[in-house]
Amino acid sequence: MTVRSRAMDTWIRNEFKDINSKLEELYFSSPEGTPLGSVGAALKQQLVEQGTALIAGLLNRGKYRRRL
């Protein structure tokens, strides 16, 4: 396993799992009828930013490298 793939694996097993659990808690504690798109925006953004950085690192190395 490469350093970058290990970082992705660690993130998914730890930070992603924790953030996702917090989002689920928010969803289930929201009043019925609350649009879920409006719940946990900061946590969703954190997932996007962290995940994007890790995925970009994987795509920019090794056999998945593409020329755009």
Image (cartoon, rainbow, N blue to C red):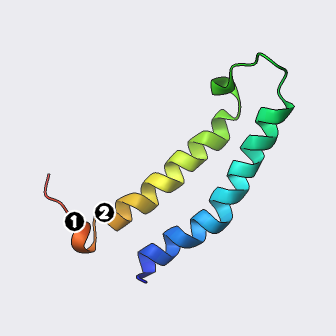
The earlier-in-sequence mark between 1 and 2 is 2
Residue to which mark 1 is pinned: 65
- Depth check: give the residue in front, 13 or 61: 13
Assign a secondary structure to mark 2: helix
Percent x, y for residue 53?
A: 44, 57
Residue 57, compared with residue 26, is above or below; it is below
The residue sitting at the top extreme is 33
Residue 26, compared with residue 11, is above or below; it is above
Q: Report whether 37 appears left or right of 54.
A: right
Percent x, y for residue 31?
A: 85, 21
Percent x, y for residue 11?
A: 58, 66
Q: Which residue is painted at 50% across and 68% down in the image?
A: 8
The residue sitting at the bottom extreme is 1
- Badge 1 amino acid: Arg
Q: Which residue is painted at 40% across and 59% down in the image?
A: 55
- Badge 2 amino acid: Leu
- Depth check: give the residue in front, 47 or 21: 21
**Badge 2: residue crowd in 10 Å (few <14, some 14–19, many ≥20):** few
Residue to which mark 2 is pinned: 59
Q: Which residue is painted at 43% across and 84% down in the image?
A: 1
Q: Report whether 55 appears left or right of 40.
A: left
Q: Are marks 1 and 2 in contact (CB under 8 Å)?
A: yes
Residue 41, compared with residue 1, is above or below; it is above
Q: Which residue is painted at 64% across and 33% down in the image?
A: 41
Percent x, y for residue 5?
A: 44, 74
Q: CA distance from mark 1 to mark 2?
A: 5 Å
